[in-house]
């Protein structure tokens, strides 16, 4: 498919990438980066909202506390996902 000269030039470019930016070279070798799934984030947010509404309606401290914990987990998931997509 490629001539020997083209293969040599491609190998030189590959070596240049390896020396200049090894992270980029590794990424190019492994393929595209998959985006993290938004499902856990949506699920945690939904649970936090449901627990908060239920806790406020029933005036139960345990449910409100559980909603706060779920909201913290959802916030961590949002932050983690945001860091991975940049």
Image: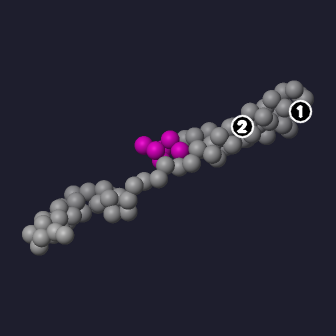
Q: How are the residues colored?
A: one colour
Circle 1 sits in a helix, a strand or a loop, which is it? loop
Q: How far is disc 2 from disc 1 in space, using C-alphas?
A: 19 Å
Is 5 left or right of 29, judged from the image as shown?
left
Residue bearing the label numbered 2: 46
Q: Nearer the viewer, residue 67 or 3?
A: 3
**Residue in the picture at 80% in, 36% down:** 51
Q: Earlier in the sequence, mark 2 or mark 1?
A: 2
Q: Residue furthest bottom?
A: 4
Q: Is residue 77 above or below residue 21?
A: above
Q: Position of residue 58 (x, y in %)?
A: 90, 29
Visible residue check, residue 19 = no
Q: Nearer the viewer, residue 54 or 11?
A: 11
Q: Main secondary structure of the magenta part?
A: helix
Which span is picked out in magenta?
80-86
Residue 60 shows which numbered tag? Answer: 1
Q: Position of residue 82 (x, y in %)?
A: 50, 41
Is residue 84 on the magenta stretch? yes
Circle 2 sits in a helix, a strand or a loop, which is it? helix
């Amino acid at each position: 498919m490629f001539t020997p000269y083209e293969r040599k030039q491609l190998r030189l470019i590959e070596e240049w990438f390896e020396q200049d930016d090894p992270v980029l070279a590794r990424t190019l070798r492994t393929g595209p980066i998959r985006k993290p799934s938004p499902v856990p984030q949506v699920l945690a947010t939904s649970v936090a909202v449901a627990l908060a509404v239920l806790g406020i309606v029933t005036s139960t401290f345990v449910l409100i506390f559980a909603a706060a914990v779920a909201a913290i987990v959802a916030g961590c998931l949002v932050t983690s996902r945001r860091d991975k997509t940049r």
